[in-house]
Image (cartoon, helix red, strand yellow):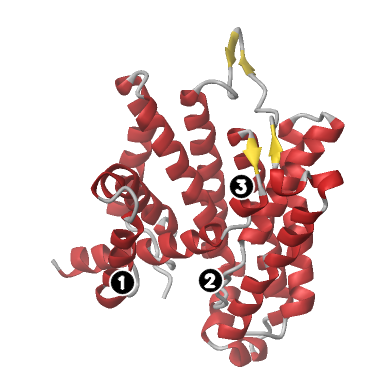
């Protein structure tokens, strides 16, 4: 069941948002904080984009395909045609959506584990093509020297997004808030009710007038577009991409992990998972086990699935309700 926001939840969200807006002014030039939280927002946005389609009941293990195509689409367009990253990132999102359209044609009749395995296998197709098309994509060498985001002028002030860690922090915060707003509207709109109906019982939803194929397809296209956007943003922030990096299982699996941990039916669930797990991983797990820190990460996920099956956010809500 998708839960509605309560007043304490709204107050908590507002307090957290104010903290993230004003904390850089308190920390000044703390590079570690900016780097960790920038990537936290990035993975939170990626998890929100992934969860849009997961709400239909189908679990994707192949969103790295949209991410990688978005990254390469934006980077190559910028490299060959010298367009602004602000334009090429949108193109990267459209490339991801086109591949999502192919998914609807090829996998539209699949459900459950068969769908998950098909999406996982589909990541290899663009990865192998890009890895071997050296004359255009530079193959396994990757694309280097990708143009960073150009400076933004606010009145007489110039904000160097390509150089300032603080500016990148705010850029990713804004991107995450936009995708969070889409996620919220998606859950609370009539479309969200249709998605909920087909997730619970597809046949009954169809009898109630929900166009099952159209609803799933449009939801997948939106999820793929936003994931492609994230890939484009990543390419221009990092300045370097290569096939194993952007088409990795890590990109497909991490949004699932963060969403399940935070609460997949909550508006802020995927973002909550990112805000807790990613900084914990970078600050604590890496220092305890620099090589095998993923073991601790895995243990937390196992504990979550065993004791908090609906996510830590839902567990907190229930505790507050019955206290």
Whether pointer 3 and pointer 1 mark residues with C-beta atoms closer than 8 Å, the reply is no
Q: Nearer the viewer, residue 142 or 109?
A: 142
Sort mark 3 into few (<14), some (14-19) or many (20+) by Cα contacts within 10 Å. Answer: many
Q: Nearer the viewer, residue 124 or 232?
A: 124
Q: Nearer the viewer, residue 92 or 52?
A: 92
Q: Which residue is mark 2?
A: 55
Q: Which residue is mark 3?
A: 230
Q: Nearer the viewer, residue 189 or 228?
A: 228
Q: Position of residue 20 (x, y in %)?
A: 37, 34
Sort mark 1 into few (<14), some (14-19) or many (20+) by Cα contacts within 10 Å. Answer: some
Q: Which circle, 3 or 2, is nearer the viewer?
A: 3
Residue at 82% x, 29% y: name it. 82
Residue at 58% x, 18% y: name it. 160
Q: Which mark is residue 302?
A: 1
On screen, 280 above or below 115?
above
Q: Position of residue 149 (x, y in %)?
A: 65, 27
The mark nearer the N terminus, 3 or 2, is 2
The mark nearer the N terminus, 3 or 1, is 3
The quarter of the picture where residue 100 lies is bottom right
Gap between marks 1 and 2, in whole Å?
A: 21 Å
Whether pointer 1 and pointer 2 mark residues with C-beta atoms closer than 8 Å, the reply is no
On screen, 297 above or below 143?
below
The residue tagged with tag 1: helix, strand or loop? helix
């Amino acid at each position: 069941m998708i839960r509605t926001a309560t007043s304490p939840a709204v107050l908590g969200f507002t307090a957290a948002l104010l903290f993230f807006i004003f904390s850089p002014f308190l920390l000044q030039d703390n590079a570690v904080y900016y780097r960790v939280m920038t990537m936290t927002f990035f993975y939170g946005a990626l998890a929100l984009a992934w969860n849009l389609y997961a709400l239909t009941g189908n679990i994707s293990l192949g969103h790295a395909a949209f991410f990688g195509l978005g990254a390469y689409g934006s980077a190559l367009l910028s490299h060959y045609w010298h367009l602004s990253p602000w334009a090429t990132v949108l193109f990267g999102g459209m490339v991801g959506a086109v591949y999502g359209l192919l998914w609807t044609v090829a996998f539209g009749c699949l459900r459950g584990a068969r769908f998950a395995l098909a999406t996982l296998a589909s990541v290899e197709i663009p990865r192998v093509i890009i890895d071997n098309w050296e004359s255009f994509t530079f193959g396994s060498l990757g694309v280097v020297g990708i143009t960073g985001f150009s400076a933004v002028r606010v009145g007489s002030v110039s904000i160097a997004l390509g150089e300032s860690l603080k500016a990148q922090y705010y850029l990713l915060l804004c991107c995450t808030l936009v995708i969070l707003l889409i996620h919220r509207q998606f859950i609370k709109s009539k479309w969200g009710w249709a998605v909920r109906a087909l997730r619970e019982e597809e046949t009954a939803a169809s009898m109630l007038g929900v166009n099952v194929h159209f609803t799933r397809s449009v939801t997948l296209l939106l999820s793929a577009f936003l994931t492609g956007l994230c890939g484009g943003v990543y390419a221009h922030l990092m300045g370097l991409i290569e096939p194993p990096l952007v088409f990795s299982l890590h990109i497909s699996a991490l949004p699932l992990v963060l969403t399940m941990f935070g609460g997949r039916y909550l508006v802020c669930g995927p973002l909550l998972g990112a805000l807790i797990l990613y900084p914990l991983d970078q600050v604590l797990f890496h220092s305890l086990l620099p090589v095998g820190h993923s073991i601790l990460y895995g243990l937390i996920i196992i504990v979550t699935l065993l004791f908090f099956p609906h996510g830590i956010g839902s567990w907190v809500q229930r505790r507050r309700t019955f206290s």
